[in-house]
């Protein structure tokens, strides 16, 4: 797989790219090694550099940089949890398949969970300047559209009339999953630890 072409396709022509992705044979390690581990590193590395070199605005304290160790540890924890979250989301997509008259297929579910995040991962570079992270959020919203198109393209062989329901339920579960990941990272690196490391 050509990583640049895959990401370009998912960002610029997602409908056509999903048609290419659907018949591809792959394994879980293939998807992780050739795509997910590389792409998930973009926001993690950008957050590390942004917190450490540029800093973040904090109430009362103003603009402050986060220590190297805290920034690095936060990036590593976020990276590992994001890789795990994609796998868990794929398990959920696969488990929900029979509910929506779809064909369970763990690899197709992982493709759907992983590849739909391409716009978000690419925009993760904006974490270099933490105040621009809103642009990453906007790219995340576009990722939801790409995610929907993956369902619509038939990766899980969902009947057309059940695509929207499958997408919405998976989206709700996915949002809850991401909130849990965010809460874990926040709990590990609370604001008080940020203040203490400065």
Image (cartoon, rainbow, N blue to C red):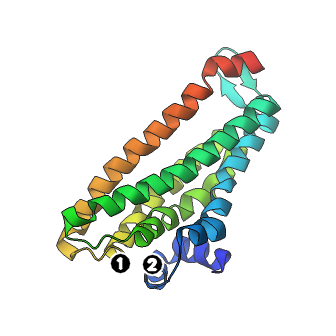
Placement of 28 over or under 96, stated as above or below: below
The quadrant in which the C terminus is found is: top right
Image coordinates of residue 193 in percent, x first then y, are: 67, 20
Asked if the residues shown at circle 2 and circle 1 are in contact, with their CB atoms under 8 angstroms apart, the answer is yes
Is residue 71 shown above or below 153? above
Location of mark 1 (residue): 153
Which residue occupies the foreground of this view, 152 or 79?
79
- Residue 102 spot, x, y in % from top left: 25, 71
Q: Residue at x 39, y 50 (%)?
A: 174
Residue 151: name its quadrant.
Answer: bottom left
Crowding at mark 1 (Cα within 10 Å: few <14, some 14-19, many 20+): many
Q: Which secondary structure, mark 1?
A: loop
* Residue 18 numbered tag: 2
The answer for how far apart the CA atoms under marks 2 and 1 are is 6 Å
Judge from the rendering whether residue 89 lies leftward or rightward of residue 7; answer left or right: left
- Horizontal relation, residue 119 to residue 173: left or right: right
Label total for image? 2
**Nearer to us in this view, 140 or 197:** 197
Residue at position x 67%, y 75% in the image: 4
x, y (%) of residue 74?
A: 68, 36
Which quadrant of the figure contains the N terminus?
A: bottom right
Quarter of the figure with residue 176: top left
* Image position of 104 (left or right of 137): left
Foreground pick, 104 / 192: 104
Q: Which mark is on residue 84?
A: none
Task: Residue 128: give x, y in percent of width and height.
Answer: 72, 46
Looking at the rendered structure, the secondary structure element under dot 2 is helix
Q: Quadrant of residue 130?
A: top right
């Amino acid at each position: 797989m050509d990583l640049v072409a895959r990401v370009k396709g998912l960002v610029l022509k997602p409908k056509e790219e999903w048609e290419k992705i659907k018949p591809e044979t792959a394994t879980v390690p293939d998807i992780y090694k050739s795509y997910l581990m590389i792409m998930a590193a973009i926001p993690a590395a950008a957050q590390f550099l942004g917190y450490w070199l540029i800093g973040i605005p904090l109430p009362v304290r103003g603009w402050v940089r986060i220590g190297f160790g805290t920034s690095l540890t936060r990036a590593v924890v976020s990276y590992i949890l994001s890789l795990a979250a994609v796998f868990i989301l794929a398990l959920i997509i696969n488990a929900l398949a029979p509910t929506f008259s779809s064909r369970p297929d763990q690899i197709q579910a992982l493709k759907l969970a992983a590849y739909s995040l391409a716009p978000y991962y690419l925009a993760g570079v904006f974490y270099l300047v933490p105040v621009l992270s809103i642009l990453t959020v906007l790219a995340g919203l576009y990722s939801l559209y790409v995610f929907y198109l993956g369902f619509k393209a038939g990766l899980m062989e969902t009947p057309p009339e059940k695509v929207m329901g499958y997408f919405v339920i998976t989206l709700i579960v996915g949002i809850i999953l991401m909130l849990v990941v965010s809460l874990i990272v926040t709990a590990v690196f609370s604001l008080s630890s940020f203040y203490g490391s400065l």
